[in-house]
Amino acid sequence: QRLRMFPSLVNCCTIDWFREWPNEALKSVANSFFADVELDSDTYPNLLQGVVDSCVFIHQSVERKSKKYYDELRRYNYVTPTSYLELLAAFTGLLGAKRSEVLAAQHRYEM
């Protein structure tokens, strides 16, 4: 009843839906995301696990720094699941770009 009388209560509100993901969820998402990425697992058997652990560490450290940022400046920096997926996509994009650079340099060297 009250919200119908004062719709600005809903329109001018901000609801914080963002919660931290547990460690297992972050690792599971990264493992499924990198399932199609070809890593040199024959030469480096623990490479995939190291990449996954690095991505989880980066995401969690950004969450910690965002809390510290809020405590010091009272400003929010939201770290969302989309942020984590963008981190994973940026890693795969950078990996592809660097691989093509190395292949081009190798091709130039061979010629």
Image (spheres, rainbow, N blue to C red):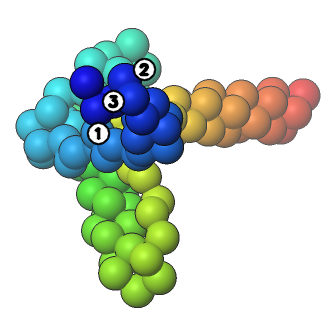
Q: Earlier in the sequence, mark 2 or mark 1?
A: 1
Q: Is residue 28 above or below residue 47?
A: above
Residue at point 35%, 35% (across, down): 81
Mark 2 in CB contact with mark 1 (< 8 angstroms) = no
Dot label at residue 3: 3
Q: Quadrant of the C terminus?
A: top right
**Which residue has dot 2 on it?**
37
Position of 77 compared to 26: left or right?
right
* Callout in the foreground (3, 2): 3
Mark 3 in CB contact with mark 2 (< 8 angstroms) = no
Spatial distance from mark 2 to mark 1, Cα to Cα?
31 Å
At label 1, counting other C-alpha atoms closer than 10 Å, the crowd grade (few under 14, some 14-19, many 20 or more) is few
Spatial distance from mark 3 to mark 2, Cα to Cα?
50 Å
Q: Earlier in the sequence, mark 3 or mark 2?
A: 3
Q: Is residue 6 above or below residue 33?
A: below
Q: Is residue 50 visible?
A: no
**Which residue has dot 1 on it?**
17
